[in-house]
Image (tube, rainbow, N blue to C red):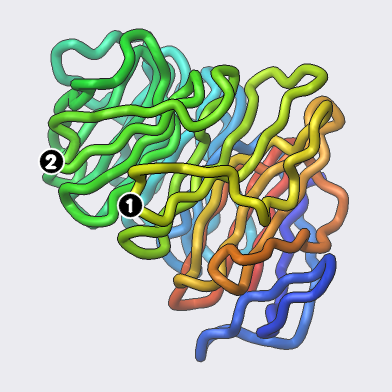
Amino acid sequence: MFCLFALFFVSSCKKQKCYVPPSPEAKSTGFTWTNQTTTGNWMASSYPDVNHGFVVGMGGSMVKTSNGSTYSVVATGTTEDLYATYFFNGTDGFIAGNNGVFKQTNNGGASWTNVTLPSGVASSVSYRNIYFYNSTLGFVTGGNNTILKTTNGGGTWSLINNGIIGGSSVYGIYFTDENIGYAGGDYGYIYNTIDGGANWSGQIVFSSRAVANDITFIDNNTGYASIAVGFPVAGDTTTLMKTTDGGQTWQVDPHSPHSTSGNPSQLSHIKFFNNQVGYMTGGYTPANTGELYCTTNGGQSWSTVSIPSCGRLRGLSLLPSEGKLYAVGLTNTILQGN
């Protein structure tokens, strides 16, 4: 079964339940759940508006919705695992994943073309994230110390990896303006740039076995990085890292709700509706159980959201103006919050 959950939020946060303060467009009557049927182990999502959504996953699988509720299968032309997607609207967007798959469409996925890569990018790169700061400035991260940049909405791309450890992978990426940005790597690294990615400097902020899956900032100084261990063993921990000085230093967030050892929750993506209300996806390996965490006070405390049993959650998309949340994960899981 494919879980598509509609949540109606109210403006409070209690033990085991957390809600988004409703925008003028959002309902606030409590949780309501609905289900639909499809199949996939979903890794990432992109929802450009309330009607259109795109979800990608393992084995080249992809589904989309054009009405905000029912989903149909999209042929991607690949069987490689897909880890990233971004759509500007219901027609124009990108997908990316293992073994060099990086494609774009201008008709909602009816057809795809391979993105033309700049020189120096290996054809077998495994891409991990697609992020756009605005409609023209965007970035793609991946293996082989790859960070790609576009300044024309994806028309052309350049390689900007000066300072990234050779042979390493880059995961989460976030910019607070067009010049200042942060990228999460493996080996416990977080990188930062002050010149739009022309140069990067890195620091080890956690275990060398850890990766920074995602990074977000709620203002110019305060940011969070969700940390996971790729193949956890006894004694490993995963946690939430926090900076309050614009990334100069990072510390383990003492309010992180999942810093247990042995079988820690694998944190995936973190996003904020505003500087107070944020959500984070995660779950447990190898049990494959999903968890969703939330804060309503800018990260001063986190709660576990009460959700039906689902697979480990990975991708996370928000529509702040509409008060909507979408979280996707393994074992046919898509959560939609209204």
Quarter of the image for residue 338 reads: bottom right
Could you say which quadrant of the image residue 103 lies in? top left
Residue sitting nearer the eye, 193 or 323: 193
Disc 2, SS: loop
Residue 59 against residue 3 in the figure, above or below: above
Residue 331 appears anywhere in the view: no
Looking at the picture, how far across and down is residue 192, in whole percent?
29, 37
Residue occupying image coordinates x 23% and y 29%: 200
Towards the viewer: 179 or 255 = 255
Indicate left or right for 194 with 210 as reference: left
Select label 1 or label 2 by which is in front: 1
| Depth check, front residue: 229 or 95 | 229
Callout 1: SS: loop
Q: CA distance from mark 1 to mark 2?
A: 15 Å
Marker disc for residue 195: 2
Q: Is residue 285 left or right of residue 49?
A: right
Task: Give the mark, 1 or 2, whose residue is nearer the N terminus.
Answer: 2
Q: Residues within 10 Å of mark 2 (few under 14, many from 20)?
A: few
Disc number for residue 85: none
